[in-house]
Amino acid sequence: MFDFTLTTSKKTTELIEDLKKELKEESFGVLLEFELHKKLAEKGLPYNHNVTILEVCNPNAAAKIIAIDPMASYFLPCKIVIIENTKETKVGVLKLAQLFSHMDNNNVEIKDIAKEIEERLIKIINKVV
């Protein structure tokens, strides 16, 4: 699997509030909160689920990674995705270590940083669910 996703009974609003609190505790900032379903509806493309994407960043980790290889910028910022339907809400992240393993340079330090950030984001999701 390319993702880590959990299911919760929380609604999107409560989940986002809880995520933002925990992200801040872990030194992550929320750069963008994007409601994909609303953007699709604006274009006349209705979608049956509410999808909210939080673009998040730990600036220290991002700075280290792009100092090693600026091409890592293609994978930034990290995204937390929330998908809500009438029955349940799912929240998850990409497995960053797997994502960054696609870089050509095979840099162990980048992979280690990506793995650390992945683990921290998973910890946050586990805590809020």
Image (tube, rainbow, N blue to C red):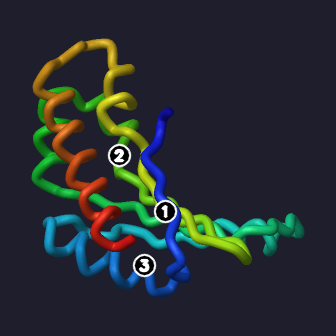
Residues 51 and 71: in front is: 51
Q: Is residue 38 visible?
A: no
Residue drawn at point x = 27 percent, y = 64 percent:
124
Q: Tell me the number on the disc at residue 127.
A: none
* Camera-side mark, 3 or 2: 3
Query: Quarter of the image holding residue 90?
Result: bottom right
Give the crowd class for mark 3: few <14, some 14-19, many >=20 residues within 10 Å.
Answer: many
Element at label 3: helix
Residue drawn at point x = 14 percent, y = 20 percent:
108
Q: Tell me the number on the disc at residue 16.
A: 3
Is tag 3's residue or tag 1's residue first in the polypeptide sequence?
3
Task: Look at label 1 and name its amino acid.
Answer: Val
Task: Look at label 3 and name its amino acid.
Answer: Ile
C-alpha gap between disc 3 and disc 2: 20 Å
Residue reaching furthest right?
A: 44
Element at label 1: strand
Q: Is residue 1 left or right of residue 68?
A: right
* Camera-side mark, 1 or 2: 1
Q: Is residue 38 left or right of residue 75?
A: right
Q: Position of residue 88 (x, y in %)?
A: 63, 71
Element at label 2: loop
Q: Which residue is mark 2?
A: 76
Is tag 1's residue or tag 2's residue first in the polypeptide sequence?
2
Residue drawn at point x = 38 percent, y = 20 percent:
102
Q: Position of residue 41 (x, y in %)?
A: 80, 72
- Relative height, residue 75 to residue 39 (above, below): above
Q: Which residue is mark 1?
A: 91
- Relative height, residue 42 to residue 124 (above, below): below
C-alpha gap between disc 1 and disc 2: 19 Å
- Relative height, residue 68 to residue 11 (above, below): above
Residues 118 and 60: in front is: 118
